[in-house]
Amino acid sequence: MNQKNIRLLYIEDDLVDQMAFKRLIKEHNLPYDLTLAGSIKAGREAFNAGVFDIVISDFLLGDGTSFEYLPEMIKTGIPVIMVTGTGDEDVAVKAIKMGASDYLIKDVEYGHLKMLPIIIDSSLQKKRSEYQIKKLSMAVEQSPSMLLITDENGRIEYINPRVTEITGYSLEELLLENLFEHHATHNTEAVFEDLRNTLTEGKRWQGNTMHQKKNGVIFWESTTISPIYDDDGHKTGYIKVAEDITEKKMAEEAIKSYSEKLREINASKDKMFSIIAHDLRTPFNGLLAFSDILSNDFESLSKDEVQEYIEVIRDLSRNTFNLLEKLLQWSRLQTGRMEYNPTVIAFDKLIETVVNLLSANARGKNIQLNSSIEEGLQVFGDTNMIHAVIRNLTSNAIKFTPENGLVHIKAHSVSDKYAEIAVSDTGIGMSANDINKLFRIECQHSTKGTKGETGTGLGLLLCKEFIDRNKGSIRVESEPGKGSRFIFTLPLTED
């Protein structure tokens, strides 16, 4: 059997019609594999036993009418052509309404048979078209992508189930809504203008857009909107194809955040290496140099020179020890090995300890160091960390304040939840550019004090880390030549 032949079942009880049709097939070499049946019973048996591409059936047969079996054949999807006698247009119309593919009215000269090949081709083509449409419709309905179709003005006419699944909105809720207005709500004006201008020019637009679900949740989608044109080139609407990329967007943000953390970690590592390579080597070089002088030339040195070298060694040792202490604190903090033990702290006692500790430094530069603490003020935090912050900020204030200046520590509650502590000085101040570098390790900002005191900038980084750990915040107010004011907050209670 030729696989390309059309498998045709012809149900007709008139032997003359059967013979005429067989002769037509032979004369015109039509590609039909013909099966004949002369009754309803024979037609049913043949249909159930074989596989056919199309069925042609007379209406009135010896044992009944084709309406008895027409529905069961039609529901299989096989095209059925109804053949009726002259004047049976009503029967033909009824058959069409029942689902027949087409109909043919007999004539006495059997000319109707010559029309059958044309009708057969038409019915099969119609079936193929319907199959393609059904296949396309199923693809659209079952697509994992969100699909929306609008009219020429952008009013929504169709959405597939995926849209409802993702957004929670039904077609009834979105029907005739303007597609473009949906993109104007949660996206930047630049994105919306680009979308509108691109589509106005008749081009396809692609991009990532933000939208809101029915339950209020914001989500991201990868969006493609294209104009739809008819055969004459007239725009009839738009089709939008979108994918929910919220998880992908979140993953990208997570990667971005992780990359930023890695950058900060690398910056911390570079800073540590820089400090170890330079800031530790320098004082040790000085210690070795002055120790060698004292060791090798002690007999030839005057008492004043020996005293001077000993004081230099003492200062270098103290500075190096302070630096090592900060490096160890920084290392422990970064590796999570520094314990956080918050308690209720009487703030006036804490400030008194810091003032007593640094009063000698202040007197050495004739700087007035004082404080004003709100009576009975208590904060909640880690005593060692907060003590280190105040000590560091006050020490810096003394370092950058010239002789006869003033350093003042003030603390008071600013709400029922937080206290504000400010360490202010009448020192050299800072520019806005320098302020921006203070709490960023990658900037490696350090300035010498008014008497040439050196530092690494690591102390302020520790201050910020400690304040953050204690659930507070820190900021700076300063201008060149007008002093500086470091302000930080701490919680009053555990809550």
Image (cartoon, helix red, strand yellow):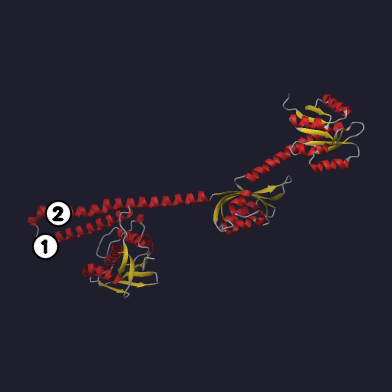
In the rendering, at what x and y percent does residue 320 appear? 22, 57
Can you say which quadrant of the picture contains the C terminus? Answer: bottom left
Residue under the image location 43 percent in, 52 percent down: 257
Q: Nearer the viewer, residue 145 or 440?
A: 145
Image side of residue 429 versus residue 321, left or right: right
- Per the image, label 1 sits on a secondary structure element best described as helix
Residue closest to the eye, 302 or 89: 89
**Most extreme residue toward the bottom, as rendered?**
375
Q: Is residue 44 above or below residue 304?
A: above
Query: Can you give x and y, in whole percent of width and height, for residue 90 in the image?
Result: 87, 42
Q: Secondary structure at mark 2?
A: helix
Task: Judge the density around disc 1: few (<14), some (14-19), many (≥20) Cα neighbours within 10 Å.
Answer: few
Residue 192 image position (x, y, % from top left): 59, 56
Residue 133: name its quadrant: top right
Is tag 1's residue or tag 2's residue first in the polypeptide sequence? 2
Q: Nearer the viewer, residue 181 or 55?
A: 55
Q: Measuring 28% from the left and 56% from the top, which residue is drawn there? A: 329
Residue at label 1?
A: 304
Callout 1–callout 2 Cβ contact below 8 Å: no
Q: Which residue is mark 2?
A: 291
Q: Is residue 70 left or right of residue 156?
A: right
Decide if residue 422 is in sight here.
no
Q: In the picture, residue 142 is in which quadrant?
A: top right
* Residue type, numbered disc 2: Ser
Residue 38 found in image quarter:
top right
In this rendering, the answer to whether 411 lies above or below 134 is below
Answer whether residue 296 is visible to the viewer in this image. yes
